[in-house]
Image: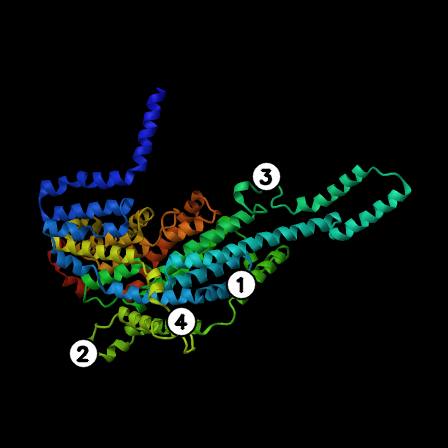
Amino acid sequence: MTNGFRFLNWLQFLFWFHRHLILIILTPLLLLPIPLIYNTKVAECAFTLLLMGVYWLTEALPLSITALIPAMLFPLFGIMKSSQVAAVFFKDFHLLLTGVICLATAIEKWGLHRRIALGLISIVGVNPGRLMLGSMVGCAFLSMWLSNTSTVAMVMPIVEAVLKQIVTAEGEARELRKRALTGTSNLGLQLDEMDRQDEKAKENMSVDPSMEKVDITIEKSIPDNQGSPCDSEAQCTPSQGYYRTQQDHPMCKCLSLCIAYSATIGGMTALTGSSTNMIFAEYMHQLYPDCNSINFGNWFIFCLPISFIALFLSWIWLHWLYLGSDFRSVLHSKAGNNERETAVAKVLQEEYKALGPISRQEIISLAIFSVMVLLWFTREPGFIPGWSSLFPDHHGYATDATVALLMGLLFFIIPAQVSTDNYETLITWKEFQSCMPWEICLLVGGGFALAEGTQASGLSHSMAKLLVPLGDLPKIATITIVCVIVTCITEVASNSATITIFLPILAPLAESINVNPLYMLIPATLSVSFSFLLPSSNPPNAIVFSYGHLTTWDMIKAGVGVNVISVLGVLLGTSTWGIPLFNLDIYPDWATNHPVNKSSIIPH
């Protein structure tokens, strides 16, 4: 019996250790009957889609390597030529990403992101509730323009330093209060007085030296015990590090979660704020070239209120969950917390002073950033003619990528120093390369190739037929189901991979049930970002989890509430101000003229 258990344990260990290799080999073998039995282009494309889906969800292969599968299988199946697959791997998205990364590289190199974060946190104050809100606003703002991962990696060390100072300041304040209550507020004077009394006693009577030593040692140890990192085992365990009270650990959990969640929420606000947004925009431009609704201005106007709602309600949820329901302390600081807040304010001031005066490089980076955002907003605002109307003979030629590349090029031209001895630009090619997410470029390219293959083979139309029964439900119910499904899957799969898989499915579904495709695709795209439950769901979650304040259950408990809040915010925006902004209540001509729609099941 013992040998049998050992064999099973060994077999289990062997399977787990080689699980990726087993998945890589078994998955295509198990899926192979699909193209062999049906022997159609739809079945062959379905084989490719399912194979990539399994590899993406399990990460048996690196995501970027899985993205190359269409370049291998589509030509072999006769779905697309190799040259056609290669052509769709590089799109306008990659040019936009290149310009944005130039900006992000300069901002991070010259420390402008730290100045912005510290400034915003300092403005809101150092009360725990206000500190939460300030950290969330600052982190969300930065993640609109930088990657979510870079933002959290930058802000979390600042918050960690503030947390340590809060805990230390609170311990010192409690120690002083206890000394005042026991009459030991000035230990040095008390010990001097004890020494004088002992010397006087020695003159009058014989004193046992060993007793004297014991008495003095005990007295000196009292303040050390009172100032120890924890007052009882219930308040502090070895695994909890430097927590001094039962209130410190929840506060550390709360601020850590605030950073991770606000970065994710902020990233969805700008069209360039996350890779999933840019993948959606490029997909729309490729599949519906006549659709002019998706641009930086419209997206920002639509998503900014959703972000405000999600941030504010998430702040209330996390505050209630970890700090309690007494929100009056946010407006009026309690007297007992003055020492803590003073110490935290001191840390923030020292951090900000350490940055020194704003540098020439920061000013230039901020100016280029401002001009880039302004040009994005005013290219095609929708409610007034934009600067693109200055080129009436070339309408639609210039995109957001054009602006990003133009501004990004300036970072390689403008000198970093005024000195003529050494000409060095604001950023170098090596610095740009270190920040450029090349794996995302391949991943997105593979997604575009997969989407093109589903159209060419007819798979997208076949999947839409299977999903037509959803058309019998109210629109808002269908969208809610889609958002919930996407949100659940993105918890265990890459955000980019999830949106890449679902876009070719949901677009034909919307056409088949006679719904504006944007009504389905925009909520789904935003919901893909809502991966709040697990440390492994996205890099921001993993970064804050690595600081040791959180457990997986902490993140699940808090993430469920933030997920519900965010999805409800998206549904609210889609069913209210999103309707007139994107004309969601009208089936558009650009979708009617789309080839997939000509064979739709439901007539228009």
- Marks 3 and 4: CB-CB under 8 Å? no
Position in image of residue 554 (x %, y %): 45, 45
Which numbered mark, 3 or 2, is in the foreground of this view? 3
1 or 2: tag closer to the N-terminus: 1
Is residue 131 at all visible to an observer of this figure? yes
Quarter where residue 34 is shown: top left
Residue at horizontal 65 percent and vertical 47 percent from the top: 227
Looking at numbered disc 2 in the image, what kind of residue is underneath it? Answer: Asp
**Of the numbered discs in the image, which one, if any, rests on residue 161?**
none
Dot 3: what SS? loop
**Of the numbered discs in the image, which one, if any, rests on residue 233?**
3
**Of the numbered discs in the image, which one, if any, rests on residue 351?**
1
Position in image of residue 127 (x %, y %): 56, 58
Using the numbered discs, state the Cα–Cα distance from disc 1 to disc 3 in whole angstroms: 34 Å
Q: Is residue 602 left or right of residue 111?
A: left
1 or 4: tag closer to the N-terminus: 1
3 or 2: tag closer to the N-terminus: 3
Q: Residue furthest top?
A: 1
Q: Residue furthest right?
A: 204
Looking at numbered disc 3 in the image, what kind of residue is underneath it? Answer: Glu
3 or 4: tag closer to the N-terminus: 3
The residue carrying pointer 4 sits among few (fewer than 14), some (14 to 19) or many (20 or more) residues within 10 Å by Cα, namely many
The residue carrying pointer 2 sits among few (fewer than 14), some (14 to 19) or many (20 or more) residues within 10 Å by Cα, namely few
Dot 4: what SS? helix
Quarter where residue 208 is shown: top right
**Which image quadrant: the N terminus?**
top left
The residue that label 2 is drawn on is 393
Residue at horizontal 24 percent and vertical 62 percent from the top: 282
4 or 2: tag closer to the N-terminus: 4
Using the numbered discs, state the Cα–Cα distance from disc 3 to disc 2 in whole angstroms: 76 Å
Using the numbered discs, state the Cα–Cα distance from disc 1 to disc 2 in whole angstroms: 53 Å
**Of the numbered discs in the image, which one, if any, rests on residue 365?**
4
